[in-house]
Each structure stands twice: as structure tokens, then as C-alpha cells.
Image (cartoon, grey):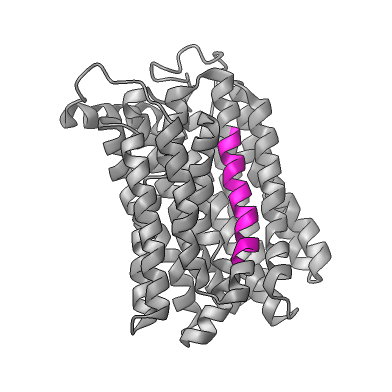
Amino acid sequence: MVIAAIGSIPFIMTLGNSMLIPILPQMKKDLDISQMQVSLTITVFSIAAAIFIPILGYLSDRFSRKVIIVPALILYGLGGLLAGFGATVFSNSYLWIIIGRILQGIGAAGTAPVAMALTGDLFKGGERSRVLGLVEASNGFGKVLSPILGSLLGLIVWYSVFFAFPAICSISIILSWVFIKERKKHKAPTPFGKYVRGLVSVFKFEGRWLFVTYLAGATCLFTLFGILFYLSDILEKEYNIDGVVKGLILAIPLLVMGTSSYITGSKIGKNQATMKKLIVLGFLMMTLSYSLLVFFKSIVPFLFVLAISSIGTGLVLPCINSLITGSVGKERRGFVTSLYGSVRFLGVAIGPPIFTRLMDWSRTGMFLSLAAFTLLVGLLAWMLIHVKNTGGKNEEKGAFRYNYI
């Protein structure tokens, strides 16, 4: 039940963006707004989360994970209510939706990244990697279910999606409150100055590989949400597919990614060398997929080729989660994992606006640009993440031993 409670947190977080994707075209039509304004409903959520994640990560280090997670989930639900009432009751609906999405983003800042740090606190070694794989799989399952759920709710009316958030959040709030039991801290919180000096030390000695892993995580989320945004648009414009069928199609690459994440997390254990190989392999698969997508326009072969990139993403994310979570001791883990979460949210935030421009520019140029970018990130991972497999003996002290170029 502890694992179920932890897994429910990233599951809830993923609904914040993915559940909206199927209803974006209807929102655009009903509110009479531009494609760029539609994309901002995703972007403002992610930017708000990215800004507040480091702050809440520090507070979770200073106080406790649970005291941050539960209020964050409550705020997440309240933001959904505000957006829902903004769309139905208040005048200037778009503005109120944006405000509600910002509140949801602040709430999301205290969910998945803090849950990742909590996993690092409660589990060790191979068990930690397994649970982190389950957490990433829960994240992926949320992404799979959310477009289907968003499509079903959209059959009622598009803004019913916003009212679903508080109901779903209540489940995670109850699970977290009842089953997550943290160890009591027997010493006073680290003074802020000492805490900052410790973080500076972490990034001074381990900043190179941390930068690459942060970039890798952001790239995975940037490409994932960008492709979903593109796919949602063409399914309606070019194939006249909407409703539940559209949600099921959007769920296919997400299901592949979630399955790949679960299998990867359950198999990697503490083997850092294997983690690095899988990260590089994942980006090579993404590069291959995006290069080949130039030649496929029919929906079935397009989805088959896109699945290659989804498998690659599923290889990359659990490995990065394990490396980052074990990179520092417990006293600073919240900030380091939260900063990683912040970067992931930035990847989500810039995805739809950039893909909007790329779609207007050139379909071929869009996919080839993605292929070149993922290849570059894969090469950086290959060159800059140099690991020595220590068996995880030093992970609680600060943690993995890395060889630097």
C-alpha cells in the first residue's frame, strides 16, 4: 500500500496535461482562441510547476515529504475546480482557465518530484530501482489512461475534464495520508547556508553528468508531449477521428512507453553501466523513429514507427530516475530530484508551442529536427556519463562514484 500510495502521486500529476490533450480542439472552437493560446493551457501549468518545484523540494528536505505532498494535491484539485467554474460561470473564461492551470501547476510541483525523493528515502539499492520503475510506469499508465479519460469526459462537455481533477486527487490524498509513514527526524533541519553550500558542492563535483541527465529527461518529455500535441491535431484535421477512438489512439504510444518503463525499472537493479547503455540505446531508438516518421503518413504505420521512440523513452527515464535519486544523500535529495522534475516540466512546457511553429513550418523539417536533437543528447550521454559500477555501496553518502572526462 505504501508503493500504491507513492505510485498514485505521479499518476495524478500526469493527468494535469495529458487529460487535456483530446479536448484542446473543442476548447479552441468554443472559446474562439488561437492554436497558440490553446497550447498555453499546457505551457502555463508546466512553467508554474517548473518554478515552484525547487522551492517545494527544499521545503520537503527541511520538513518532510508528506507535509508537502498532501497540501500540493489539495491545491492541484482546487485549481481544477477554478478552471472548471471559469469555463462555465465566470466571464472571460480563458483567463480564469489560465489562472486555474497556474494553481494546478504549483500543486503539481509538490507531487511527483517529491514522491521520487520519498522513494529514495524509503527504499535502497535494487529495491529502489524497482520501485522507481513502478513510479515511472505509474506515470506512464497515467499518460495512457488520461487521453481516454479526457475523451470520455469530453463526450459530456469539454470542460468536465477540469471538474474531474478534485475527485481523482482525493483518492491520492487519502492513500498518502493513511499509508505513507516517514521516519521521524531526530536532528534539527540543516541551516539554509549550510544546505546551499552542500548543494553547490554536489553540482561542483557531479554537475556535468547531472546536467546531461536533466537534459535527457527534459528531452524525453519535450518530444513526448510535442508528438501527442501534433497527433491530436492531425487526427481531427486529416482523419476526422475524435472522441474515445482518438483517446485510444493517443494512448497507444503512451502504453508502449509505460510498459517499457516498468520492465526497465524491474531489471536494471543497481547496475550503473547498464543504465548508461540503456540511456544511449533509448536515444538512438528515438532518433531512428523520428527519422523514419518522415516517410509515413498513414496512421497505422505511423503509430508502429512511433512506438520505437516510445520504447526508447521507456528505456531512458527509469535509468535517469535511479541515477539522480541515488546521486546525493537524503538531506539534499529533495532539492536535486525536484530540480530534475522542474527541468522535465520545462520540457513539457516548451513542447506544444515549439511543435506549433514546427507544424506550420514543415512536417519533414519537424521530424528531422527532432531526430538530430535526440541524437545529440544521446551522444552527450555517451560521452559525459562515465560510471564505475560500485554496487551501490556508497549511495547514501553522496552516492555513486563517477569518472569525469
Image height of 45 relative to 403, above or below: below
Q: Residue at x 29, y 27 (%)?
A: 201
Q: Is residue 182 magenta?
A: no
Quick one: which residue is furthest to the top in this view? Answer: 393
| Placement of the N terminus among the 4 image quadrants | top right
The image shows residue 33 at horizontal and vertical percentages of: 46, 84
Q: Is residue 40 left or right of residue 8?
A: left
Q: Residue at x 63, y 48 (%)?
A: 141
Image height of 282 relative to 293, above or below: above
Viewer-proximal residue, 352 or 75?
Answer: 75
Image height of 207 relative to 144, above or below: above
The image shows residue 300 at horizontal and vertical percentages of: 82, 65
**Res 285 visible:** no
The answer to which image quadrant residue 275 occupies is top right
Viewer-proximal residue, 24 or 160?
Answer: 160
Q: Is residue 371 left or right of residue 383?
A: right
**Res 11 visible:** yes
Q: Residue at x 57, y 17 (%)?
A: 389
| Magenta-highlighted residues | 133-150
The image shows residue 228 at horizontal and vertical percentages of: 62, 63
Q: Is residue 142 magenta?
A: yes
The image shows residue 159 at horizontal and vertical percentages of: 49, 74
Viewer-proximal residue, 194 or 5?
Answer: 5
Q: Is residue 286 left or right of residue 86?
A: right
The answer to which image quadrant residue 181 occupies is top left
Q: Is residue 351 left or right of residue 371?
A: left
How would you classify the magenta stretch by its main secondary structure? helix
Q: Residue at x 66, y 68 (%)?
A: 231
